[in-house]
Image (spheres, grey):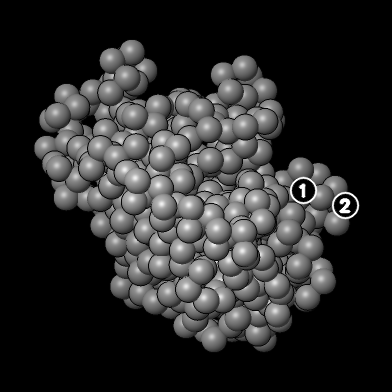
């Protein structure tokens, strides 16, 4: 039977053709979601090895699949970790095994296949980390120019991936929401393909394949634990499980547990108060940048998934995330980023409070590798994330001395002196130096160049004299 699927607005229910290329509902501005005909789903058969493209029959059609070998990640039984937590039946779905060490490779494979098949030569994507790294990698594979819009705070490992895949990176705003706004503008002005997770309905279709794999790996859980930022992941997995139920491939749906950082928990707050819509937070605070989302675009869908599954939402502290990350690595050899480790960090308290039985089957989604972040590495070396005044002065001095060696630009400065810092932090130091008149800048083409001023030279001379005195 020929695949039958439409794009349907999750808010007003308006139906668009699946090949319309729409990113948002033209009627109400709501999120669009692919909805498959139930009779078609009942006829679906999967063939080939357990990899992402095995599920092509339930993915929107693309002319030419682009692949780096994504999917087919292991469902690891974790006996030592379970025993340490006093539990009986725990498994980790280890998405760190994907090509760029992140679950976002699933979305990227489908999105880039769509962009390539439609003949786009350039794309734009707002990202706070994993999705941008994945999009950059798959764009390189497909020879598509990749323009990434990022907020100031960004994990250095993810930024390094974006850079090595030759993406053009533009910093825009303090938050991911501001970056998304800029991506929308560029899409309209430049005619680029829109690859942002929150703006492309293919994202959900790519991520739902995690649910398919879990079931085919024999892992029908009583409980599935998923970290939440925008809410896209948990709503995507729920979509996958419901499709599997329609197919008759599972006997029961799992109950979902959504986890957010205690300092940035708009979805959990809405769940606890009985609201259907998350209330935007003014300033969400967490070191887990992957889930630092103050205005979750998929929040309503996440809340719907949690309630339909008879699940619940909880928060964990940054400290508990980091501790859980160390335990997962120590006991099971899986290095998870803090946001991923949040799923394991939530287990102990949920069992102790009686919300979950110790003998229940539990699966925690590990979305991304700790090698992409500096949080766990810094906690292991006991370095403080917030530098004191002295080290701030040292950083500015290093930057000023590098610029004094000759005209340069931001990325060159970061590569020279920015070890252990995000590029956004380096640019902030540069901005401070320019504001104080110690350096000046000029824009040539698309690149801004910096050089030291006479005042900057005098400042360095004064610092040299001070060091002699000390």
Write the residue at 43% across / 75% down.
Answer: 164
Q: Kindly identify which residue carries mark 2.
A: 27
- Circle 1 — which element? loop
Write the residue at 26% across / 57% down.
Answer: 74
Residue 444, x across and y down, in percent? 70, 80
Neighbour tally class for label 2: few under 14, some 14-19, many 20 plus, Cα within 10 Å: few
Query: Mark 2 to mark 1: distance in Å?
Result: 8 Å
Whether residue 79 is situated above or below residue 7 in the rendered picture = above
Asked where in the image residue 112 lies, by quadrant, the reply is: bottom right
Q: Is residue 56 in view?
A: no
- 260 or 217: nearer the viewer: 260
Whether residue 423 is situated above or below residue 336 in the rendered picture = below
Outermost residue to the top:
353
Residue 86, x across and y down, in percent? 17, 24
- Circle 2 — which element? loop
Q: Is residue 96 in view?
A: yes
Write the residue at 40% across / 27% down.
Answer: 317
Please say if the residues under marks 2 and 1 sit with CB atoms less than 8 Å apart.
yes
Q: Kindly identify which residue carries mark 1.
A: 30
The disc placed on residue 63 is none
Write the residue at 55% across / 29% down.
Answer: 265
Image quarter hosting the N terminus: bottom right
Asked where in the image residue 89 lies, by quadrant, the reply is: top left
Q: Is residue 412 left or right of residue 271?
A: left
Q: Is residue 308 left or right of residue 46?
A: right
Q: Is residue 256 left or right of residue 23?
A: left
Residue 371, x across and y down, in percent? 31, 56
Neighbour tally class for label 1: few under 14, some 14-19, many 20 plus, Cα within 10 Å: some
Residue 255, x across and y down, in percent? 43, 32
């Amino acid at each position: 039977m020929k695949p039958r699927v439409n794009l349907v607005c999750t808010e007003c229910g308006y139906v668009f053709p699946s090949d319309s290329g729409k990113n948002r509902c033209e009627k109400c501005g709501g999120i669009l979601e692919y909805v498959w005909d139930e009779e078609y789903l009942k006829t679906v058969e999967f063939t080939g090895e357990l990899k992402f493209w095995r599920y092509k029959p339930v993915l929107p059609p693309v002319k030419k699949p682009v692949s780096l070998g994504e999917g087919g990640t292991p469902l690891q039984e974790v006996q030592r970790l379970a025993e340490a937590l006093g539990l009986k039946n725990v498994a980790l779905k280890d998405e760190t095994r994907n090509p760029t060490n992140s679950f976002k490779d699933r979305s990227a494979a489908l999105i880039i296949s769509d962009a390539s098949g439609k003949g786009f030569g350039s794309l734009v994507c707002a990202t706070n980390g994993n999705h941008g790294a994945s999009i950059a990698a798959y764009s390189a594979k497909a020879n598509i120019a990749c323009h990434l819009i990022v907020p100031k705070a960004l994990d250095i490992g993810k930024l390094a991936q974006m850079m090595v895949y030759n993406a053009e990176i533009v910093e825009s705003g303090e938050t991911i929401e501001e970056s998304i706004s800029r991506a929308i503008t560029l899409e309209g002005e430049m005619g680029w393909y829109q690859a942002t997770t929150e703006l492309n309905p293919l994202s959900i279709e790519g991520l739902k394949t995690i649910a398919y794999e879990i079931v085919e790996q024999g892992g029908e859980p009583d409980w599935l634990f998923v970290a939440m930022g925008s809410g896209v992941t948990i709503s995507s997995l729920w979509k996958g499980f419901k499709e599997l139920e329609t197919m008759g491939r599972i006997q029961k749906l799992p109950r979902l547990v959504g986890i957010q950082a205690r300092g940035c928990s708009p979805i959990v707050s809405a769940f606890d108060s009985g609201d259907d819509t998350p209330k935007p937070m003014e300033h969400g605070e967490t070191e887990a940048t992957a889930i630092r989302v103050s205005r979750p675009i998929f929040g309503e869908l996440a809340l719907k998934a949690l309630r339909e599954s008879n699940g619940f939402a909880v928060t964990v502290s940054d400290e508990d995330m980091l501790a859980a990350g160390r335990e997962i690595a120590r006991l099971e050899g899986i290095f998870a980023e803090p946001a991923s480790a949040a799923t394991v960090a939530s287990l102990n308290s949920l069992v102790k409070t009686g919300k979950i039985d110790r003998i229940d089957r539990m699966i925690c989604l590990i979305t991304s590798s700790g090698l992409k972040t500096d949080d766990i590495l810094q906690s292991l070396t006991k370095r403080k994330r917030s530098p004191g005044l002295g080290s701030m002065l040292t950083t500015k001095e290093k930057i000023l001395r590098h610029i004094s060696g000759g005209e340069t630009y931001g990325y060159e400065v970061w590569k020279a002196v920015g070890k252990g810092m995000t590029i956004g932090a380096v640019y902030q130091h540069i901005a401070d130096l320019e504001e104080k008149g110690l350096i000046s800048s000029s824009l040539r083409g698309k690149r801004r160049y910096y050089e030291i001023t006479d005042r900057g030279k005098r400042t360095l001379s004064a610092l040299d004299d001070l060091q002699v005195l000390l």
